[in-house]
Image (cartoon, rainbow, N blue to C red):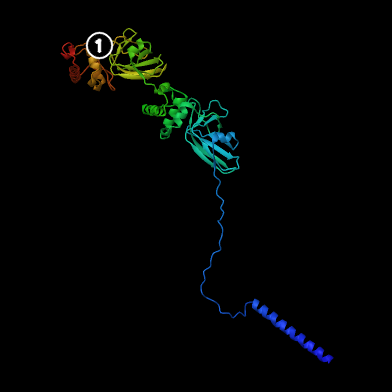
Amino acid sequence: MKKFAVGCAAAIGVFAVVIVGIALATTIFDFNGTTDTTPTDTTPTQTTPAETGPVETTEPATPIEVEFVDAQSRGLIEYSAYGRASLEQFQLNITSESDDTLEIVILPGTIFDPQAAYYIQSLVVITEKLVLLDPHEAVESLNIDAGTINMQLDTPGEDDSLVLSMTPASGDLMLLLNLPDFQDFDFRIQQFAIWTLTDNPGLNEYPDTGPSDEEIDNIRSLFEIAGIPTEEYRVLQPPVYVELIEAQSMGLIGVSARGTGSINRIQMSLTSNSDDVLEVAILPGTIFISSAAGVQSMVVVAEKLVLLDPYEAVESVNIDAACANMELDAPEESNSLVLSTTPASGDLVLLLNLPEFHDETLRVQQFAVWTITDNPGRGGYMGIATGFAIFGTGPRDEEIERIRVLFGKAGISTDKYQALL
């Protein structure tokens, strides 16, 4: 009985082990997915996207706008500047010392002075420049549009260091630089306009050739638009018109003259004694008398205008003239001539003011003048050599006829002149 109980217990144990083994194998087999006979549902399904929140993006930092002078004074930037051997540009290097992104504004009127050399010009910015700097970024070799301030000094070269002036331009110069019309002109007019303000030169004191009449008119127009008083600037002052003899008699000018060895030209020098700009008119009929015996006086045959800045001296002005004393010698360069206070009159002035007279050859002009001043007979004229001729000749018949026509047009009677009878 006891053996039977032990045998039953053993059989039950074996059966339990088999059952556990089968269960374990089934579990493993299912886990590997090889015994799943469930039909696969092939109906398409739409996947619903997972709901997500807004995507966070990092936007660029907004630049901090700061004016160049202010940025430098606050230590936000470091800079260096050098000339470019040019009147119209200089080189600027900038390094950010800030943790922020900076937009540096370099304004018109910002001034850069030479660091050491006293003979180098200062430069003034004429066009606004914007420079974007990332934190601690360095930007080199920026070209900055500028004009020079000290007209008579040298242009900064590439080795000439410039330093920022803490005092920007002001007054009339700022009015000019901030004028939109100023930016529309070429650099030549811009620079002349700046020099007009900063150096206030006379017309003949600008470097090189100086501004033309048209450029002066443009500068005057810019000043008027900007509200800058033109009367304070010498080159923009309207000239005072005055005739040569009157100007000398009033003490406004000093006059000296000399011959040239020619019968049709003299040289004159003028010196202004006036605070005004003078437009001196040398009129036809103005006479210069020789100070030496045996030398002809000369009479001006064509109007000449000479513009004189205040206290300016102008040398060697060529004046078209004719000899007024046929039998005497033509004045040489060594012969001084004195301005007569009494101009020509009568028939001579009628002749010299005739427009057709100025269209004639020098021979006809001179023979016509001698006809009035000396009244020679037909064969009594002094000869005039022209071209490569060595010996001079008197007037030809056709030249006498042209003189007769000139006299008729001028209203001069030919009856009293021997050569025209």
- Viewer-proximal residue among 327 and 215: 215
Q: Is residue 380 or residue 388 the one in the foreground? A: 380
Residue 401 position within the rendered picture, expressed as x and y whole percent measured from the top left:
17, 19
Tally of numbered tags:
1
- Looking at the rendering, in which quadrant would you find the N terminus? bottom right
Q: Quick check: 372 above or below 67?
A: above
Mark 1: which amino acid? Answer: Ser
Does residue 374 appear left or right of residue 151 in this picture? Answer: left
> Picture coordinates of residue 101 (x, y %)?
56, 43
Residue at 29% from the left image edge and 9% from the top image edge: 342
Residue farthest toward the right in the current orientation of the protein: 2
Q: Residues within 10 Å of mark 1 (few under 14, many from 20)?
A: few
Can residue 202 be spotted in the picture? no
Q: Position of residue 358 (x, y in %)?
A: 25, 21
Q: Quadrant of residue 353?
A: top left
Residue 224 visible in rendering: yes
Q: Secondary structure at mark 1?
A: loop
Residue 291 in the figure: left or right of residue 16:
left
**Residue 139 to residue 363: above or below:** below
Q: Residue at x 79, y 87 (%)?
A: 9
Q: Quadrant of the C terminus?
A: top left
Which of these two is toward me, 45 or 116? 45
* Residue holding disc 1: 345
Relative to 77, is 301 on the left or the right? left
Residue 160 found in image quarter: top right
